[in-house]
Image: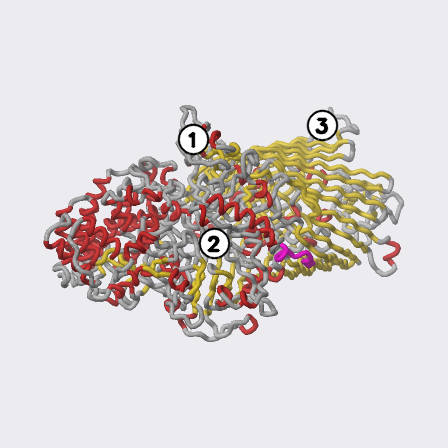
Amino acid sequence: TVLDANAMPLPGATILVKGTNEGTQTDFDGNFTVEATAQDILMVSYIGFKSVEIPVGQQTSIQITLEEDSAALDEVVVVGYGTQKKSVVTGAISSIKASELESLPVTRIEQSLQGRTSGITIAANSGQPGSSSTIRVRGITSFGNNEPLWVVDGVIVDAGGIGYLNQSDIESIEVLKDAASQAIYGARAAAGVILVTTKKGKMGKLTVSYNGYTGLSGPARKLDLLNATEYATLFNEKYANDYNGSPQDFSLPFPNAQSLGEGTDWQDVIFNNSAKKENHEFSLSGGNEVSTFYLSFGYLDQEGIVAKEISKYKRQNIRLNSTHHINDIITVGETIGYSNEKSTGIGNTNSEFGGPLSSSINLDPTTPLIITDPAVANSGLYTNPGVVRDPNGNPYGISNLVIQEMANPLAYIQTRLGNYNWADNFVGNVYVNLELLEGLNLRSTLGGKLAYYGSESFTPVSFLNTSSVVSQNNISRSTNRGFGWNIENTLSYTKQLGDHDFTILLGQGSYSENDTKGETVTYNDIPVNSREDAAFIQVPDDQIIASAYIGTEHRVTSLFSRLTYNYKEKYLVTGIVRRDGSSRFGSNNKYGFFPSFSLGWNPLKEDFWKENDVVNQFKLRGGYGVVGSDAIGDFRYLSTIGAGRNYTFGNVSAVVIGNSPNAPANPDLKWEETRQSNIGFDARFFNNLTMTVDFYNKKTVGILQDVRLPGYVGATGSPSANVADMVNKGFDIELGYSKTFGELNVSLNGNLSYLQNEVVYLGNGIDFLSGGAGFQSSTYPITRTALGQPYNSFFGFQTRGIFQNQQEIDSYVNSEGVVIQPNAVPGDFRYEDVDDNGSITSDDRKFLGSSIPKYTFGLTLNLDYKNFDLLVFSQGAAGNKIFQGLRRLDISNANYQTEALNRWTGEGTSNTFPRLSNVDSNNNFTNPSDFYLEKGDYLRIKTVQLGYSLKREVIEDIGLTRLRVYLTGENLFTFTKYTGFDPEIGGGIFGIDRGFYPQARTGLVGLNIQF
Amino acid sequence: LLSCSKEYIELDPLGQPLVDNYYSNESEAYSGLVATYDIMGKQSKSFENMITMMNAGSDDFFAGGGGPSDGIGIQSFSNYSIDASTIPGSFWNDYFQGVFRTNILLQKLPDVPMDEALRTRFTAEAKALRAYYYFELVRLFRNVPLFTEPILTSEIYNIEQADPEAVYAQIETDLTEALPDLPSRITDLENEAGRLTQGSVQALLGKVYLYEDKNQMAAQQFAEVNGTPGGTSKYGYKLVDNFADLFSLDNEFNSESILEVAATSLANVNYDIWGGGQNEGNTVNQMVGPRGYSRTAGSSAPDYAGGWSFNTVTQGLYDVLNGDPRFDATIADLKALEAAGEATYTPGNKDTGYFLKKFMPLNSEKSTGGGNVELNYRQNVYIIRLADTYLMEAEALGASGARAQALLDAVRARVGLAPVPVSMDNIMLERRRELAGEGHRWFDLVRTDRAASVLADRGFTASKNEILPIPLNELENTLIVQNPNY
């Protein structure tokens, strides 16, 4: 019997008779049987434990207790097309095991990486249930696609598609961070590779597990917005500031602001303090010598914290993984997962153009939520067809002051009820492994992903305000199908010749993705106007609008090889060569060649290094490699003709289809290359302190991007080109500490990453790229990519306080004595005259900070005491700026945050918040300036979990092996100075807050059962 | 194994022909021609359209809209705070797209196997359109680069602006060359109304000469377009009897129409394609409608649809038209309707109570197809109509003489007004009344050096605001030089 230190059986441990091929594995109860003679020595090993050698002697029954190997260095790491002992890995790879993920309340697996691995920046794209996160491995590698490559059990799955995975199905997640380890995925590895391995069955007794939790969520934070009295007071003040009529005609728009009281708190209207979240995951696994299987089922149902009627997510999934040893040579296996998802979104998130969040921030508090006065309810705007009413028949209030896309959220919700998106995903692979000779394996894998997805919606006739009018209803359905597949054939040979240990891998693969098609059908003006009755009722032909599309397939073909070699595990070498061909490049540049090598040294294995208690393990690693990217549109190397440049001819006004060339082609388009060197070490000190440190320098050359041409070229659309070079350098540190104090087990794991990003080349003589991120109706882009600066740095005007009086305006002159802002009035911003030309123009913009966090960090504390366990996990980011763009600038009457109460109202009142004005002739509010930039630093207590496991003796009687209950708090505290909802803002460019759907604060109670 | 071959990664673009193989037959050439016409829609078919923009810069209209920052481009043009960052780039980009499309078509046409007569006509249309687009560019921005063939990729960043005289010379050449090869008038109105004819190109050429102060040459061209004042010209042009009918949707491509941009309610325009090549709806309608317009019960007020209250009418234009027979067809007096208890609306930015009736959106005209109702109005707009060429000829004739007098009289007589003595001031006054809101006024003020005084209270700066600033994007990493004083 093989047991662990707690006398628990270890199933699946390997027993070998030394010097022979004889061997076996323990069954579920830790038992094994092996034939051996008295002179033989048994070698017993198990992952995560120290191996032992036991002389058999005269024993017929042996009880072996394995000691846990606290050194993480002996773990096995998935490296792409195989595994390696962590002690001989030469690349920079972070890995997370199932045990660290169990019962964490994440709904998508990428969230489980946040704060747990170094070198990765993760920010939620939205707090909307089911939405994905933005992941950056060692910074922003390219200007275009920065999504890491996801490989699930060997199948490449696009980043948007990993939502189908169940949390508890994950065996491990590995992140390949340096080029030396990424290069095996050459063509699409530049932005990092994330390898996900799902659980497989184990021989022995059937195991049944259940993990589930349920709880409630609410917003962690509300904005402080003006109430009705404050709003009206400021409205009056603004009116007076802008007034230029005759004094006798002057009258305040809100003559009695105090009487308005608090008014409507629109945030209260949309926020949901009791959003339900529940998750259940069952699994069943087991098997025998021939076949093993793992079967699981998951169910997740979550409501959003904003407008819960239209913010929901539901997912059900099934997974079956199995392996069959047909004979000594042939092994066949498969992993297959299916998921069904249904989500309802609030429409606009992280967009300043409407939706409930943006509306609640911008709507004036003086408009009532519901109109109860019949005189008002039956006049004016409320007589329009489609005005939305509450169950009592009273219309929802419509603002006269804040219009455009800003609608009463309750009315808006009514117009979207019942709309949803759905998806069915099938992802799986089948493989055959032939062990032709000992150590020689031929493996063929066929993987694929088939996705069906679409949406259903009914839009009733509605009148939300004078700008948001739907005068005829419609019902719409869209259906899409996407297919991707890959075939990989690898031949590997592992051999030990004396002290020389080597593995050779040769492989060939071909990949296809984006084989998509779909159609949308809309029936307009169906003869019903209630959601319940809405159906595709026959309407006249011209009321049926249909459209269809077919996607462009993206294909890659590859050849690759890898040699790993070590001498006594002392000197380690890995070399990789890969060649990829992509359908996205022209004939001259179709193929890219991606080599890498890395070296390692374990000095502790040298004779001169004496065994000691200070340094228990130490491995030095270093490598260099090149990986590539073809993440650009299809056929950009060809000059294509586009349709839809139409015109109307004839007195019957018929649309005639016009065609003309698209953007100019770039036949020279070639692979983007990322060259990365990495040096680091893995070490263990004082037996319980582990440390991994990596320094890297990553240079991306020939970055692919669509180029914004000057308008005079006359192109429709933008061509693509290799436009820039960029460097990311920094370091990643992971620290682990674990120690037992009596019955208290303490483990502390932390990581810290530092990153510096700089654009180093943009073409000859080019200092910056045209364009940048836009913001609302701002006429200037708010970011700029320029030489010597981080990618997409914030760019705008620098304020230098506020003019307190006319004398300050008159004395604000340039070096030649020219008054710089002669038209300013007291209360306006003083802008820095960067070019010293005596006036404020577009040339006075400068770099105002970066959206890329310099530091990201995480800290996990685990405590175990008797039957209690406690987890405290926190993470954060620092060194970045956020553009706080919550208020709509082109809606003059939009509400303000309470910071506006500290506006300038006279000399000495404020030096940071200018006077209020709608005319805003000094562009205090419309100029993008440091006024909108805030520090994005934050530290968040992300998860706190307290668990209690019932004693084994107690539950054994009822047939259980595990019973644990736990309480979880999620996003309990966030320490930040940021004034928006949430400083964690994902998206293509981090850190532009346009009304971000904040993350929820959640309390959960959960249960783990195993038998 | 198929994956090892090179063919595996050689894919053909589905549904996207290659430029090298395209223009291989008549219908492909025609689709290329349609794409060159597409840009004519700039007059009315997007938020950034010529009519509301140019109206907003004149003394007849304000920008209006929902608030002082609703549409920063049009607002800043209206109050002359416009600069490189606020000028909507599309006023530059779109016309250059038109130039590019005509250039590629003119490059390809000689090799297309097609009917010779059609090739000649297509070539003439492309040249005339290139001239039209350059005319818009040169009168808006003055200093623009000149291309007569597609720009080479290697040359993109080495382009300098041309001498405006050279641009005008090319415009004249293109129009002169196009003229003889065009049909004198469109006979197949059902399919071809809106395409260029000798009449429209000659009118355009006259207008170009007028802008160049080549008055005598201008008058020659206009004389052929106009014929006998009040009569029917050789191209069949004749003033429409009833002024209000000019803006009736049942009377499009009428005898007074010389160059007209058609719109349709059938293009299913939504906000994703608004302003792009697939936008075939008239946006001016929606823009100029009063916000939240609603009629009171039993009202006899017109059944306007609500809009976005752009281009509110100034008191100045109101006063000039007050008492004029054209008032009712030009200005919607919401102030009066509201005072009479007939209708209500929500005042927007720079509300005066007066709206541009020529393009008032009507509930009866709301599209019933797909897309957004507000983006699918179908009203056509004129770029040039006969009353305009009458008055331009009178001006080109030096605002004196019997013919000039007869031309002015004819315009006034059509609406029942007695003659006034012909003079520059009277012609300009007549243009203001006759063509109000059709996008001419700002150009007229600048062309006749009246802008600096008339628009002084708007903030117009002489020697600066006569032309627009060049958009910021054009100045970045290029050799393009900003216009003076911007």
Seen in the picture, residue A981 relative to A696 is either above or below; the reply is below
Disc 1 with disc 3 on a shared chain: yes
Can residue A899 be seen here? The reply is yes
Residue at 82% of width from left, 41% of height from top? A745
- When asked about the image quadrant of residue A396, the answer is bottom right
Tell me the subunit letter for badge 1. Answer: A
**Image position of B128 (left or right of B319):** left
Residue at mark 3: A606
Furthest residue toward front = A248
Residue at mark 2: B2
Is B173 covered by the magenta stretch? Answer: no
Between marks 2 and 1 in the image, the one whose residue lies nearer the viewer? 1
Tell me the subunit letter for badge 3. Answer: A
- When asked about the image quadrant of residue A854, the answer is top right
Which is nearer the eye, A937 or A272?
A272
Q: Give the magenta range.
A: A267-277
Q: Position of residue A477 (x, y in %)?
A: 50, 66
Q: Which mark is residue A972?
A: none
Tell me the subunit letter for badge 2. Answer: B
Amino acid type, residue under disc 2 in the picture: Leu
Amino acid type, residue under disc 3 in the picture: Glu
**Image position of A770 (left or right of A3):** left
Q: Position of residue B148 (x, y in %)?
A: 24, 45
Which is nearer the eye, A148 or A20?
A148
SS under mark 2: helix
Residue at mark 1: A820
**Image position of A43 (left or right of A260):** right
Q: Residues within 10 Å of mark 3 (few under 14, many from 20)?
A: few
SS under mark 3: loop
